[in-house]
C-alpha cells in the first residue's frame, strides 16, 4: 500500500467470504486469485461472478495448484476436488482474450507447509472490449 501511495495509485480491495460476496457487475479492473483452493462446488459460480464483475478490458490473474499437485508432497489440498485443471479455467474464460495459460512445475517457497517443487496452473486473461 505504501508503494501504491508513493506512486499515486489507488488500490481498492475487500477481505470477505467469497462464497457469499457480491462481486458486482462491471466493477473491477482486475481480479487476482493466488493459491485460493476452491471446491468444484463453488468454482463455476465463482468464475462466472468474476467474469461479470470485471470491467471491459479487466484482467483475471490466477495461479493455483493443479490436479498434478497430488504427485508432490509440497503443499496444497489433498482433495482433488479442490484442485483445478488448465482446461477448466480456459473453458470458463473462453470468451476472454487469453494472455497466458499454462501448467508448469516450479519451486514454491512459502513456509514449511508450501515448499518445494509443485505443479501449478498459471492463467491470465482480459475481458474483451
Image (cartoon, rainbow, N blue to C red):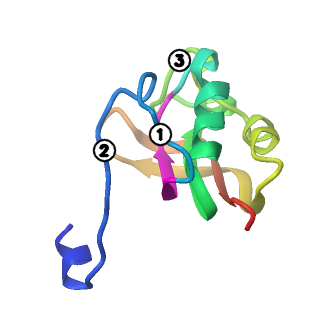
The residue beneath circle 3 is: 78
Identify the mark at residue 23; answer none if there is no mark.
1
Rendered position, 10 above or below 107: below
Within 10 Å of disc 3 (Cα), the crowding (few <14, some 14-19, many 20+) is few
Q: Earlier in the sequence, mark 3 or mark 1?
A: 1
Residue drawn 56% across the image and 53% down it: 26
Instruction: Give the alpha-carbon distance from disc 3 to disc 1, as whole Å.
Output: 28 Å
Taking the image as shown, residue 66 lies to the left or right of residue 7, namely: right
Within 10 Å of disc 2 (Cα), the crowding (few <14, some 14-19, many 20+) is few
Instruction: Give the alpha-carbon distance from disc 1 to disc 2, as whole Å.
Output: 10 Å
Q: Are marks 3 and 1 in contact (CB under 8 Å)?
A: no
Rendered position, 125 above or below 88: below
Image quadrant holding the N terminus, namely: bottom left
Taking the image as shown, residue 40 lies to the left or right of residue 53, namely: right
Across and down, in percent, residue 60 comes to 59, 54
Identify the mark at residue 14; answer none if there is no mark.
2
SS of the residue at dot 1? Answer: loop
The residue stretch that appears in magenta: 27-37
SS of the residue at dot 2? Answer: loop
The foreground one among 92 and 75 is 92
Determine which quarter of the picture holds residue 127: bottom right
Instruction: Give the alpha-carbon distance from disc 3 to disc 2, as whole Å.
Output: 28 Å
Main SS category, magenta section: strand
Across and down, in percent, residue 108 comes to 45, 48
Which numbered disc, 3 or 1, marks the residue closer to the eye?
Answer: 1
Amino acid at each position: 500500500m505504501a508503494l501504491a501511495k508513493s506512486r499515486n495509485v489507488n488500490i481498492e480491495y475487500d477481505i470477505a467470504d467469497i462464497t457469499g460476496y457480491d462481486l458486482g457487475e462491471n466493477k473491477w479492473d482486475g481480479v487476482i486469485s493466488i493459491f485460493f483452493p476452491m471446491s468444484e462446488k463453488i468454482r463455476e459460480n465463482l468464475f462466472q461472478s468474476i467474469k461479470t464483475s470485471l470491467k471491459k478490458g479487466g484482467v483475471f490473474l490466477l495461479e493455483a495448484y493443479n490436479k498434478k499437485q497430488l504427485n508432490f508432497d509440497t503443499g496444497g489440498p489433498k482433495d482433488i476436488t479442490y484442485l483445478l485443471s488448465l482446461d477448466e479455467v480456459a473453458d470458463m474464460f473462453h470468451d476472454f482474450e487469453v494472455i497466458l495459460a499454462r501448467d508448469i512445475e516450479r519451486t514454491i517457497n512459502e513456509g514449511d507447509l508450501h515448499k518445494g517443487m509443485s505443479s501449478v496452473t498459471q492463467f491470465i486473461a482480459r475481458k474483451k472490449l
